[in-house]
Amino acid sequence: MNDQPRSRPQGTSQGKSPGKPKGKPYRRPQRDPVRILAFEALRAVDERDAYANLVLPSLLRNAEAEAVKKGGEFDRRDAALATELVYGTLRRQGTYDAVIAACVDRPLREVDPPVLDVLALGAHQLLGTRIPPHAAVSATVELARCVLGDGRARFVNAVLRKIAAQDLDAWVAQVAPPYDDDPEAHLAVVHSHPRWIVSALWDALGGGRAGIEDLLEADNERPEVTLVARPGRSTAEEVAASLPPEATEPGRWSRYAVRLAEGGDPGAVDAVGEGRAGVQDEGSQLVAAALAAAPLDGRDALWLDGCAGPGGKAALLAALAAQRGAVLVASEKQPHRARLVARTLAGNPGPYQVIVADGTRPAWAAGSFDRVLVDVPCTGLGALRRRPEARWRRKAEDVAGFASLQRGLLTEALRAVRVGGVVGYATCSPHPAETRAVVEDVLRGRGTDEPLTAEWIDARPLMAEVPALGDGPDVQLWPHLHGTDAMYLALLRRTS
């Protein structure tokens, strides 16, 4: 499977072709606000490298406002369908592209990108939802007439009718290479991941076929919405009690977590609107809590979050620090992200400080802090459930591109902490080159003239309720095993 299956030309004109059939009165296409919205979201992802989780809420708000303006409504069911069409199409893009390629008479790179987006939306409705085939084809052709013109809509109609001839299992059996011939290529098509990511995740996970298939399938599932109750301002029990019993479940592992039932809207939770709780994956909660709970001798007064944006872990750390009379300094290199951090931390019960600073060129003196967290920039391969489009943007060479920055941030974090203090190195990627390899490089002094001596702290006892954490001393969480993002955590104590 091609890691960039579409190789789409950017900025291709959508040009309209009325193509009016002779002898028949022309019927104007029916505009379906839900599918128009889904198409616009996919175009934003494709043309502007937008992220669906950022562009979709704005489009939903605009659709709702437009519907009200016209005296109608864009209700929760419409929003749910639009969301499913966008995320489902993005998650299964690789599989659908393989199916579409089998139904057209030219390479996909020669098909205009807007046409491919419409075809992918149609393929998802046919192969990935319970929408009846005739309705899926009809609705997608109407969408094509609206956004592509009647001429290209006829092409869309012909392709979708071919796709509708088989279900997903039959298509996969036809377009995926046999597992015995090429396991990685087979899994790449079946589970809609670039081949290099399949290989990298398999290396990180180890084991046989069952484990990697479970992981890849988990990447294609809709993630739960998990809230974090911020200590000193709310508790998980209080947040849950403010909602109907059927609307929430307790967190699996974090004492601060509340899981919303499917379709739950965090914006409707009073504690979220008031800043007493926030939206945060349970893996991120566990990382912050583990750093706060790591054993420490002596002073415990000043903490640092060295890569704080957009502020989720910083808010939890600030709340935990305040309970001990400690102060958190939240540092973020990008000013606009620092503003997000400040907004997230507003109302914290204890003192804190948000600063704009580069963690590789620190604005603080060496040995200033007792606890330091660096949740470093990475490929994000551990959060593909939330950002499915990222799998098609990342390339294998991106991993090496992050390595120098990751080593630099961890090195400076060790300098920032006092002797005896604790550093947490975290990343939302399970790739070996972004996790343990970075820590081992830094401990060996790679890239620095002043090696710092530090020792591993076994992080597993700090997540005692969580199973399957590996051999330690570091911790790797997994979507298919823990229901979290694939967060990695290494804890180090500076010894000299």
Image: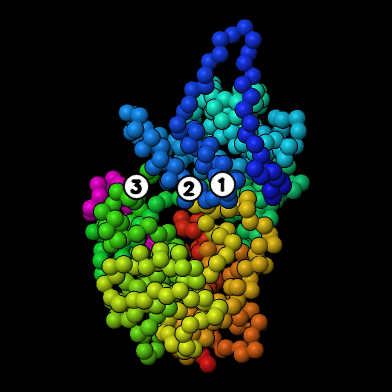
Query: Start and end of the magenta stretch?
Result: 241-254
Image-based side of 353 in relation to 150, left or right: left
Asked if residue 109 lies left or right of residue 57, the reply is: right
Residue behind mark 2: 55
Point out residue 496 in the picture as x, y percentages from the top left corner: 53, 92
Q: In the rendered structure, which amino acid carries the disc numbered 2?
A: Val
Residue at the outermost bottom position:
496
User: Residue 172: within the magenta?
Assistant: no
Whether 143 is drawn above or below 230: the answer is: above
* Residue 478 point in image, percent of width and height: 52, 59
Residue 458 visible in rendering = no
Query: Which residue is more in the foreground, 236 or 73?
Result: 73
Which amino acid does the dot numbered 3 rest on?
A: Asp
Residue 464: quadrant of the picture: bottom left
Closest to the observer, 176 or 115: 115
Tag in front: 3 or 1:
1
From what the image shows, is residue 434 above or below residue 410?
above
Element type where label 3 sits in the image: loop
Q: Considering only order in the chain, which callout, 1 or 3, is on the residue closer to the N terminus? A: 1
Q: Are marks 3 and 2 in contact (CB under 8 Å)?
A: no
**230, above or below 64, in the image:** below
Q: In 3D space, how far apart are the residues under numbered discs 2 and 1 (Cα atoms)?
A: 8 Å
- Of callouts 2 and 1, the N-terminal one: 1
Q: Determine contact: label 2, label 1, CB under 8 Å.
A: yes
- Asked if residue 73 lies left or right of residue 164, the reply is left
Q: Nearer the viewer, residue 384 or 408?
A: 408
First of labels 3, 2 by sequence position? 2
Q: Which mark is residue 265?
A: 3
- Amino acid type assigned to the residue bearing label 1 in the image: Val
Image quadrant where residue 286 sits = bottom left
Q: Which residue is mark 1?
A: 45
